[in-house]
Image (tube, rainbow, N blue to C red):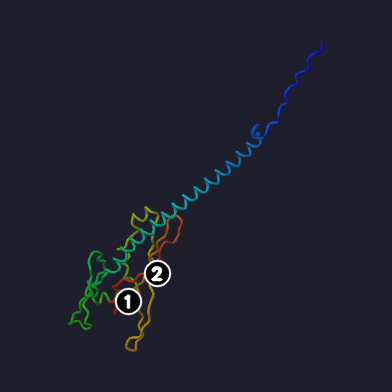
Amino acid sequence: MKRPPPIPFPRHRQRTRGARGFSLVELMVSSVLLVLALTGTSVLFIESNRSSAAATLRYRQQALVDTDLARVRRLNDRYTCSTGTCSSLGTVELGKHDFFPPPVSTDATGNSTAGNTFEALCNSTVLISQLVSDIGATPSTLTAAGVTYSIDTANQGQQTISEFGTTVVRNLHRYTITYTNSTSGELLRRVTLVPTTVAWCP
């Protein structure tokens, strides 16, 4: 009696790459690449936010400087010594007769006492002292935004002119106000001003 032929075992087909999945090394490499990509994206996002915040702060500081400079210019333009004592009438509109003391015809020079005082101030370096005091320290709105200013009166300047054959040296009474970022020291604005009343100096 013949034995039946043996049943052949099916051969296992070699599985493809997709069927057998990823190896541990490939998964680790993929994870490292993903972490690097996410890290780079996070850094870019943080730097972008930081730059945006810095630009917003700088814009706000410049707007506050504009507002404060308007205040300083108003005090500067309404600074008068017509009474012999200098002060800034920041809320009062001044006319051309409000900057110089009215003359007195009985005086030998035609000046009143206030006029003589004003002339002496014009020939000194203290004419703008009260103006600097009126401008005052840095307002709280600026300090809260990280802005401070300083006022330099050391370099007021002089002008040499000839009047009726005589050389006359006049003080220009300039002052410089400088706004800076109190944290970084960055210069925000520097403006040199001269009080309007100086135009009436003899």
Which residue bears the numbered disc 2? Answer: 154
Under tag 1, what secondary structure?
Answer: loop
Question: Residue 158 at x, y = what percent?
Answer: 38, 77
**At 32% across and 67% down in the image, what residue appears?**
129
Quadrant in which the N terminus appears? top right
**N-terminal label among 2 and 1:** 1
Q: Is residue 125 above or below residue 18?
A: below
**At 80% across and 13% down in the image, what residue appears?**
3
Amino acid residing under circle 2? Ala
Quadrant of residue 114 within the rendered picture: bottom left
Question: Residue 138 at x, y = what percent?
Answer: 35, 58
Question: Residue 167 at x, y = what percent?
Answer: 36, 85
Say the numbered circle drawn on residue 27.
none
Under tag 2, what secondary structure?
Answer: loop
CA–CA distance between discs 2 and 1?
15 Å
Which residue bears the numbered disc 1? Answer: 123
183 left or right, relative to 88: right
Q: Residue furthest front?
A: 1
Amino acid residing under circle 1? Asn
Quadrant in which the C terminus appears? bottom left
191 left or right, relative to 95: right
Quadrant of residue 104 within the rendered picture: bottom left
